[in-house]
Amino acid sequence: MLRSFLKICLRNLARHKIYTLINLLGLGTGIAASIFILLWIADEISYDDFHANGDRIYSVMVNNHQPEREIETYPVAPALLKDVLLEKIPEVEKASRYSFETDLLLKHEGHPFQEKGIYADPAFFSIMSFPIVEGNSIENVLPGKNSIAISQALAERIFQNENPIGKTISLPNGLDLAVSEVFENAPENSSLQFDFVLPFELMLDENPWMQNWQSGGSRTVVLLRDGAEVPSEKISSLISENCRDCTNRPFLFPFQKQHLHAGFENGVSVGGRIQQVYLFSFVAFLILAMACVNFMNLSTARSASRSKEVGVRKSVGASKWNLMVQFIGESVILTWFALIFALMLVQLLLPVFNEITDKSLVLNLANPILWGGVILLTLVTGLMAGSYPAWVLAQFNPSKVLKGDSKSGLTGAGLRKALVVAQFAASVILILGSIVVYQQIQFISNRNLGFDRENIIVIDQNEGLVKAYSGIKNELQQLSGVEEVAFGGNNVFTIPIMSTDPKWPGKTDQNQVNFKVFRCDAGFLPTLDIPLIAGRNFVGERDSSNYLINRKAAEDMGLSVEEAVGTKIDMWHGPGVIVGVTEDFHNDNLKFGIQPMIMMYSENLGNHYLVRLSAQQPLDQVLAQVEDVFKEYNPGYPFEFSFLNEVFDREYRMEQVIGKLSMGFTILAILISCLGLFGLSLFTAEQRAKEIGVRKVLGASVSNLVLMLYRDFGVLVGISLLIGVPIAWFLISNFLSGYTFHTTVHWWLYVGVGVFMMLLTLLSVGFQSLKVAFSNPVDSLHLDG
């Protein structure tokens, strides 16, 4: 029985090679796209799931409540909050502060190592699952300010095969630390990536402004007691109880949800990367469904060719159930062949996919979970593709079929047309969506940010630069290939430090402006070509207690730009005055608006130096001259830099990934749709061969015949445009509404996609139409007779 079944199945596949190839390519491509997306989704949802107490770990976040404004949410909290949490909230078992990841140049016996790490309290290792493998026990990690914990990878890089415990590592400021612990490397699916941990007390010593309830420059994580309720209400007033002027209200958010659910609007979590998971899950289903539609359409359209087989089997006693099992089995077997093709395709293209997504995904065929998922995907695909065709074939009336009426059992022409319409409507939505995502990426890349980011290199701060900055700056300015030199404390594209500390005459309790705070020297504005609209720039150390603000800050303070200049202001550097107002420039992600900003004078409190290079001289030559200057003053450190444009691109890396993936999967969807259309046009031409022959004999031209064959499909694609374009418009509007600044979508884009779809249909149908139209009518009439 099984042998006979397999023989019939393979014989049918071999007999109809073109249709088998079309189905194999369509299903294989659909399964391959689904496997790619499933690998990506599995990696995304696995982030931070390795923490042993993950369900009890919460991040402390804050909502900033401003009168007549939307609530703004930040992942930072005052450093002072940790001790209050432990003292007043009994549900909190442990708490730890930790910094954002920072790059530092570490030294051991004169050898430099540029590494990424964090500052954290000792309890960090008790809360998170980064196991200690050498050194002190988990209860005694980071025993003092002169200690440092390092990863296994860093220990191997610095000490090779030596025991690192007790060895000395020097910080850029000259402080010597002893290695007290070695911890396991952070997994790739950890949202925190670091190779060393420094005592948080060192960060407080370097940044005394953090010892203030109105400041937030670090993150806090807590471990709740086993079985404890989340104490949301209890902690919401902890900041206001200790700071009358503060408008921030802390709350707890599950740490394991941060990677995918980091998007907040008006104080409420509204998504984040999870929306991309949902999006690509839908895209995977859509592409697979389109491939199944091809199979169903071709199978039902060609059902007449198997009518006699069905008639004979029913005559000898086969039931509808037996026939349906056979035909579904045939589709499942074809899907298994498609799976083999899909796995080969995935293995071939996985390096490209990893490069696009910046991941290290592996198709591990030894993983039983992966195999289970792939087998389930294949079976579902086979059942989904084969169920309806099997039902259609099983309905044939054996008496009529055996008398030669092979078309009496044919059904489903209307459904086939509906499926073609749905398929192309989906393609229209994907094409328009991909184009708009690409346009938004281009809009971001070309957006005038309010400053010039071209020909600027960014150099990370280190001990040598801090000591020699004045000499380096003077010598660089003597080079003809260097136009400006500046210090800028943070990443100018997304300035992380915010504070409601500043006080000025006329400030009220209702005017708690949350300022972005940026440290820079007098060279910052000219280096980035940021225009001053009132007052003057910093001139040097004499402005160490004075401030610059942007236009937005003046507006939020209730001042005109002219009134702002000379206004007294008091914050971390002490009382001073606003000496100048700059034009607004983007200081946050383009999803958000321009934020009020205060600039404080500094030549060393921060991370970056900026050098504008001349565009009139060879880049390699100028960089070599700049490197010579840095090596002269800073010989103990390697000369490493990034272009400011590269820093900008990294800020929008995820948008670029989505754009590339969307375009890639859209191309696959178009390919699958065209394969289906080609297969249906091939079948239609075969079925109408006699009609075409008669029309040619009666004088029909080739163009008339091609138009006749094209018209039916053209109408279906036209209907798909009427359905797909409004849906695409709605989804595009929703996507762009997430950006304060976004591209404009013109009407001609929709028209252009409509024309493209019609031309694509003509191309898919046209080849077979021309072939039939040019054929000899005698052949078709003779074959039919």
Image (cartoon, helix red, strand yellow):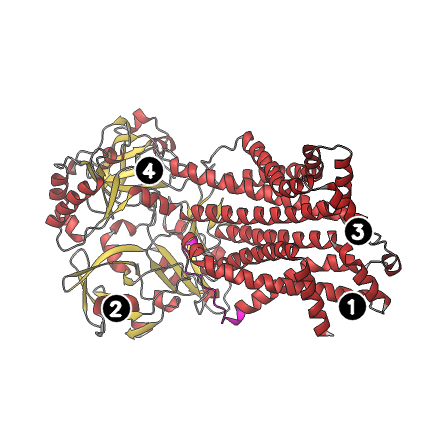
Q: Is residue 366 within the magenta segment?
A: yes
Q: Nearer the viewer, residue 426 or 8?
A: 8
Among numbered discs 1 and 2, the one appearing first in the sequence? 2
Work out how far the residue at label 4 is from the one at label 1, CA to CA, in angstroms.
Answer: 74 Å
Q: Distance of mark 1 from mark 2, alpha carbons?
A: 66 Å
The answer to the question of whether label 3 and label 1 lie on touching residues, with beta carbons closer than 8 A, is no
- Decide: few, some or many residues near mark 1? Use Cα within 10 Å; few <14, some 14-19, many ≥20: few
Circle count: 4
- Label 2 or label 4, whichever comes before in sequence order: 2
Can you say which quadrant of the picture contains the N terminus? bottom right
* Residue 713 appears anywhere in the view: yes
- Name the kind of residue labelled 4 in the image: Met
Cα distance in 3D space between marks 3 and 1: 20 Å
Q: Earlier in the sequence, mark 3 or mark 1?
A: 1
Q: CA distance from mark 2 to mark 4?
A: 41 Å
Structural distance between the alpha carbons of marks 3 and 2: 71 Å
Residue that numbered label 4 is attached to: 597
* Residue tagged 1: 322
Image mark for residue 411: 3
Q: Which mark is residue 101?
A: none
Answer left or right for 126 relative to 234: left
Find numbered disc 4 in the image and state the secondary structure of the residue it sits on.
strand
| Residue 606 can be seen in this image | no
Query: 10 Å neighbourhood of mark 4: few (<14), some, or many (≥20)?
Result: many
Nearest to N terminus: mark 4 or mark 1: 1
Mark 3, residues whose alpha carbon is within 10 Å: few (<14), some, or many (≥20)?
A: some
